[in-house]
Image: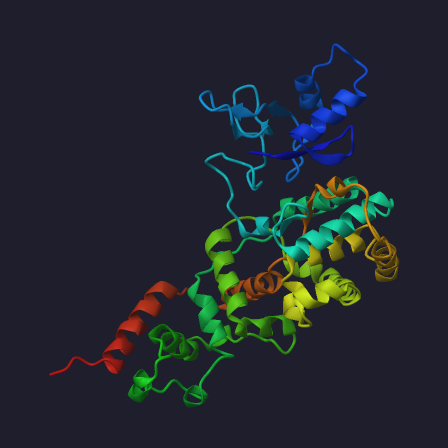
């Protein structure tokens, strides 16, 4: 169910009631119905397809209360969903439930205080003509263009992430080779799977990550990054995507801009702290930083001037101006870079590996050593 849609006439994202109100105020053609206007006017806020339909609110016949709010539906004459397969609103059986969809940011419909504060900045930017909702849509279209290139396809086994992680996260006893130490089982943190990966690394040393040349790969030591890389592999293996490393320079610029915004906003400093991980982990802030750079042709000096003008706005008159879905094109960037590096390492292996079989076999061997059956 699509609650908001982009109106080409009014050049903004609106919900059904807002669009109908503007239509009633501005329609000069009494023969034109709101439903016909909607068919010709709106686009999906996520994938930009047109041809949407207005669906009136539904009320309970017994109580008269609203059971389903008015919304928009994107379907053809046969009732087939016309959203693109990777769109969040697509409901077809071939929907692509991929991690790449995670970057969407609804600036005004989040319970997060940080998102709401950034939503006000978006409203201020639109109100002062620094950018428009169309600029935000243009940025999403730019990202869609990257995704549709689909030049990068990987097929990885999730175990490869933890084996590679073991090259950086190793105990002293496992510095040079894997050593079984049964006394370790007395520790509450003992994890047999962890031991399996420690052991498998020495069987597959080719999976050592070259984090000295690519510092982004060092983040594999973080459980969150490793977990997200595994999620990407599970969800997106075999799906055409694009190589996120082409965004490296823009990612660094966006981090700088996001840092400037956070440091200049007293409340955001409190909410987000001072670490880069928290900064880059803030989807709305990175989306806003990317937008500022996008409308500035990725010129950081020009972006900073726009941000200063926005922060100078004391209040906004129209909070609905921020009814727009933004985009963080850098979401899970470290995890994507890690997946790309692992893909390259696996491609360089001169033999095929069944990592599931390797993991199960080694786990069975270590269980017998760590937990021998009592006589």
- In the rendered view, tell whether residue 276 sits above or below residue 289: below
Task: Provide residue 237's location: percent of width, then percent of height.
Answer: 49, 53
Query: Is residue 350 among what the camera can see?
Result: no
Q: Quadrant of residue 182?
A: bottom left
- In the rendered view, tell whether residue 192 sits above or below residue 136: below
Q: Residue at x 59, y 53 (%)?
A: 152
Task: Provide residue 339's location: percent of width, then percent of height.
Answer: 55, 62
Task: Provide residue 299's location: percent of width, then percent of height.
Answer: 85, 58
Q: Residue at x 58, y 48 (%)?
A: 101
Colouring style: rainbow
Outermost residue toward the top? Answer: 31
Outermost residue toward the left? Answer: 375
Task: Provide residue 349's location: percent of width, then percent of height.
Answer: 48, 68
Q: Residue at x 42, y 80 (%)?
A: 202
Image quarter (top left, top right, bottom left or bottom right) of the N terminus: top right
Front in this rendered view, residue 364 or 80 = 80
Query: Is residue 168 among what the camera can see?
Result: yes
Image quarter (top left, top right, bottom left or bottom right) of the C terminus: bottom left
How many numbered marks are there? 0
Q: Residue at x 88, y 55 (%)?
A: 309
Left or right: where 168 falls relative to 39: left
- In the rendered view, tell whether residue 136 sits above or below residue 200: above
């Amino acid at each position: 169910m699509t609650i908001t849609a982009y109106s080409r006439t009014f050049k903004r994202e609106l919900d059904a009631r807002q669009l109908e109100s503007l239509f009633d105020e501005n329609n000069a053609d009494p023969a034109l119905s709101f439903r016909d206007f909607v068919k010709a006017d709106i686009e999906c806020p996520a994938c930009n397809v047109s041809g949407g339909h207005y669906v009136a609110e539904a009320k309970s016949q017994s109580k008269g209360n609203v059971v389903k709010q008015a919304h928009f539906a994107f379907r053809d004459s046969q009732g087939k969903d016309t959203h693109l397969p990777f769109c969040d609103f697509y409901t077809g059986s071939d929907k692509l439930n991929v991690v790449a969809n995670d970057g969407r940011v609804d600036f005004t419909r989040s319970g997060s205080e940080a998102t709401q504060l950034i939503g006000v900045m978006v409203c201020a930017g639109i109100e002062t003509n620094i950018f428009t909702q169309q600029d935000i849509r243009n940025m999403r279209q730019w990202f869609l263009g990257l995704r549709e290139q689909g030049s990068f396809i990987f097929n990885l086994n999730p175990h490869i992430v933890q084996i590679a992680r073991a090259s950086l996260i190793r105990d002293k006893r496992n510095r040079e080779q894997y050593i079984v130490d049964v006394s370790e089982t007395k520790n509450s943190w003992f994890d047999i799977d962890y031991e399996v990966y420690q052991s498998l690394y020495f069987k597959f040393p080719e999976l050592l990550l070259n984090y000295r040349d690519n510092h982004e790969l060092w983040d594999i030591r973080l459980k969150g990054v490793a977990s997200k890389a595994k999620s990407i592999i599970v969800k997106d293996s075999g799906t055409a995507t694009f190589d996120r490393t082409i965004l490296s320079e823009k990612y660094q610029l966006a981090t700088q801009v996001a840092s400037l915004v956070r440091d200049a906003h007293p409340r955001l400093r409190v909410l987000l702290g001072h670490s880069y991980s928290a900064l880059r982990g803030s989807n709305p802030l990175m989306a806003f930083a990317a937008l500022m750079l996008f409308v500035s042709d990725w010129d950081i000096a020009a972006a900073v001037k726009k941000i200063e003008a926005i922060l100078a706005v004391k209040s906004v008159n129209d909070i609905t101006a921020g009814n727009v879905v933004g985009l963080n094109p850098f979401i899970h960037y470290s995890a994507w870079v890690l997946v790309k590096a692992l893909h390259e390492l696996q491609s360089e292996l001169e033999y095929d590996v069944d990592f599931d079989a390797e993991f199960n076999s080694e786990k069975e061997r270590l269980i017998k050593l760590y937990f021998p059956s009592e006589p």
